[in-house]
Each structure stands twice: as C-alpha cells, then as structure tokens.
Image (cartoon, rainbow, N blue to C red):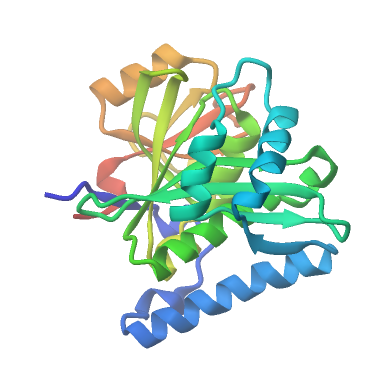
Amino acid sequence: MTAPTYRKPEAICDVEPGIEHLVSPEQIALSVRSQKEKIEQKIAALGLRLRFATRDDIDAISELQLKSFPSGTALEDPYVLFRIVTYGYAPILETADGRIVACNICEGYDDPERTAWGIRITVDPSVSQHNLGADLATYTCLVGIERGSRVRRAFLSPTNLRSAANILNYVGYTAENFDLNIPGHGPRFVVTLQLTPAGIRNNRIDLDKARAFMNSHQVGRDFAVVACADVDGLARMYRDTPFKVVGFLKASAHSQEPCFLAFPESRLRVSQ
C-alpha cells in the first residue's frame, strides 16, 4: 500500500492546463527536459554554473552549510555527504571563480513510491534574492522523475518562514504530516510532492487566487488558517481534523502574523 499524494485545487494555483495530459514516456521526458532547461537558463543568466557535486566538493559544501545555518543545527557530516554525492544527487551552483553558493542534497529510497528525499537546501546570502533554493528544489524533483521516483518528500520547520514560502508556494509541496519531535530536529512537517510534470508545475500557489478564494469561502469549512508560531495548534489540526497545510501567507484577513493556509483533504485531489 502506497501513501496518498496530493494535488492542490486549481482555484488557488498557477496552472498550465496542457501539462495535465502528458502521459506517454516521450511526452514526460520532453516536459522534464524543457522545465530543466528553463532553470538552467535562469542560472546561467545570473553568471552561475549548475553541476552535480562530487566528493571533491564535500569540504566546500560543509563550509557553506556551516556559514548558512545557526550554530547547533544538526548538519550532515562528511561521511553522509560522501554517500549523498556518490549515490544520491546534489546539484550545486558555483560562481565563475568556482565558489559554491548553493546546494540541494537529495537521496532516493526503495520504498513503494521510490521516494526522492530532499535533505537540505543551502543558499549563500549573496544570491538569496533570486529564489534559487526553490529553483534547485524543482530541479531535483525533475531529476527524481528521470531516476524513477514517484514522490518527493522533505522536512520543513514551521518556524523557517523563508523555506515555508519557497517549499509550499513556489515548489508546490503539501504537508502530509506534522511531527512534534523529529529526532535531532524537533517539530517538522513532512511535505510531499507528486513527481509528474503536472504535479511539479501545477501545485504552485497563486497568492492572488488564494486570497480571492479565502474571501469567497468559509473559514473552518473550506479552508483553515493557523499561525506559524502556533505549534500546538498545528499539532491539533493534524491530529483532530482533515486539514492539510498547502501554502504560506505573510498575513491575511484572518491573521495579522505569518500563517499557514490549510485545506481539508476532501478538497485535495488525492491519488494512491
């Protein structure tokens, strides 16, 4: 039995309708290649080079992580990074002089869904204004399709607001579970994304459409809003209700602080 994967309603998403009907291996391969090329062209236009990391990059990746995350963050040690760059995949972005400024480390698993697990996205502050973390996450989702993965998963901290915007709104993940105590990390969403061209392209939140939906529908029935800082409220929602987090809002008519937008599972297109 495989776990369900979720598709957000078109009413709140930036949708390219034609991509929904790609079914043949040839069509899917062409779409994946096209989406990868768009990301590669954006990165090249910024004067950066995209390539996959090797064991020679492990020290530089560790240095970037140490510089980018707060002291005490549980980071991957050199052995784990060696395993990932050798048997997983880790696209990196580097400047013309060879300095690594972004990295997304991922591993594939042999569960029924062939899960591609996004372990960590790291972006140097010098290039953080270009939304490259979301681009790398999407790029590795596309690589996952090429490698036979059917679902992408990752952890997301409810208090990491920049990542929440990237992961939920721009990449398109849905938070399938909420765990109060992931070992070594604390409270985390387990976020998931269906690895099909449409699953990757058409789950991105259109904030104008999302606000219009909220203005014309009933809170508590059609959608819910929970403050990002309300960890207990998120835990109760996942334990006691059918609502799943689908997006991030800096603020809304229902909350003056950063919050998560959630939909009942009945409003999500679920595939098994």
Q: Residue at x 63, y 43 (%)?
A: 58
The location of residue 132, given as percent across then percent down, is 70, 52
**Location of residue 22 by image quarter:** bottom left
Report whether 169 appears left or right of 48.
left
Q: Residue at x 48, y 79 (%)?
A: 31
Nearer to the camera, 35 or 230: 35
Q: Residue at x 40, y 62 (%)?
A: 199
Report whether 96 appears left or right of 43.
right
Rendered position, 109 above or below 177: below
Nearer to the camera, 241 or 235: 235
Nearer to the camera, 143 or 51: 51
Q: Residue furthest left?
A: 1
Nearer to the camera, 28 or 204: 28
The location of residue 110, given as percent across then percent down, is 25, 52
**Location of residue 253 by image quarter:** top right
Q: Residue furthest bottom?
A: 26
Residue 211 in sight in this render: no
Rendered position, 11 above or below 168: below
Q: Residue furthest top?
A: 232
Q: Residue at x 49, y 74 (%)?
A: 32
Question: The C terminus is located in which quarter?
Answer: bottom left
The location of residue 48, given as percent across then percent down, is 80, 61
Residue 122 in sight in this render: yes
Mark count: 0
The location of residue 246, given as percent across then percent down, is 44, 42
